[in-house]
Image (cartoon, rainbow, N blue to C red):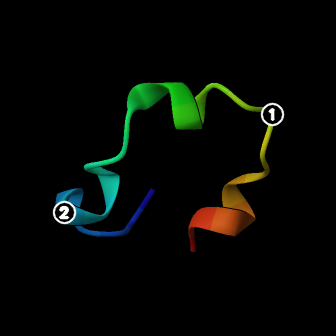
Amino acid sequence: YQLPITNYQLPITNYQLPIPITHYQ
């Protein structure tokens, strides 16, 4: 999760999925 906080304005529910961290690079 090295992206700016602005990229995380989506609902937290979107991050409850078992998605690899690589998708957030």
The quarter of the picture where the C terminus appears is bottom right
Amino acid type, residue under disc 1 in the picture: Pro
Mark 1, residue position: 18
Q: Badges 1 and 2: C-beta atoms under 8 Å apart? A: no
Which label was assigned to residue 2? none
In percent of width and height, residue 19 lies at 78, 45
What distance separates the C-alpha of mark 1 from that of mark 2? 21 Å
Residue at point 56%, 35% (across, down): 15
Residue at point 38%, 34% (across, down): 11
- The residue lying toward the viewer, choosing from 25 and 17, is 17
Q: Secondary structure at mark 1?
A: loop
Seen in the picture, residue 23 relative to 20 is either above or below; the reply is: below
Tell me: 12 left or right of 13. left
Q: Give the mark nearer the N terminus: 1 vs 2.
A: 2
In percent of width and height, residue 3 lies at 35, 69
In percent of width and height, residue 18 lies at 80, 33
Seen in the picture, residue 11 relative to 9 is either above or below; the reply is: above
Mark 2, residue position: 6
Residue at point 72%, 66% (across, down): 22
Tell me: 20 left or right of 15. right
Quarter-of-image position of residue 5: bottom left
Residue at point 63%, 25% (across, down): 16
Amino acid type, residue under disc 2 in the picture: Thr
